[in-house]
Amino acid sequence: MKVNQAEKTIDMTVSGTFTPEKAQEFIKDYQQKLSTIKPEEFVLQFDCRDLAVVSQDMVPNLEACLAMYRDSEFKKVVVGIQKKPIIKLQLNRLAGNVGLTNFEVVEIY
């Protein structure tokens, strides 16, 4: 996770699958980085080209992360993925479930 002050972005790479341990580690790092910026001025960008379909048991953790992004009030949240319609549908559905309206999935890889 990198804060790019010049571009007003926070750039993250997500790959593989989520585990509870990875989720907790990520949340701690996220909160630390967030404390150094004004989120409403930043775009949160994810490189998710290697993201696997989220398993049902991890859906609540991912929804909690998406709700955290919503509550942080970023200018926009952009997720870049490979051309994988199932993942795109899943991410859009989960974002909708938590009311993250400034969310966009783009097939760029």
Image (spheres, rainbow, N blue to C red):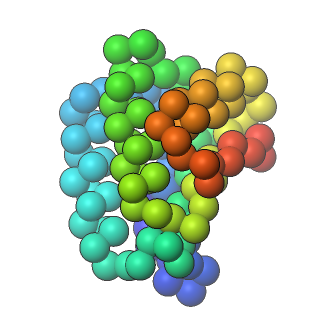
On screen, residue 1 versus residue 5, left or right, reads: left
On screen, residue 13 versus residue 22, left or right, reads: right
Where is residue 11 drawn, in percent x and y?
Answer: 52, 62
Q: Quadrant of residue 21?
A: top left
The residue at the point 68 percent across, 25 percent down is 89
Above or below: residue 88 compared with residue 47: above
Q: Quadrant of residue 67?
A: top left
Callout count = 0
Q: Quadrant of residue 50?
A: top right
Where is residue 95 drawn, in percent x and y?
Answer: 55, 37
In which quadrant will I find the N terminus? bottom left
On screen, residue 40 versus residue 63, left or right, reads: right
Where is residue 109 drawn, in percent x and y?
Answer: 75, 43
- Residues 9 and 60: in front is 60
Above or below: residue 56 compared with residue 101: above
The residue at the point 30 percent across, 27 percent down is 19
In this rendering, does residue 7 appear at all? yes
- Residues 105 and 47: in front is 105
Farthest-out residue, bottom: 6
The residue at the point 37 percent across, 50 percent down is 68
In this rendering, does residue 15 appear at all? no
Farthest-out residue, top: 56
Where is residue 31 drawn, in percent x and y?
Answer: 27, 61
Above or below: residue 94 compared with residue 108: above
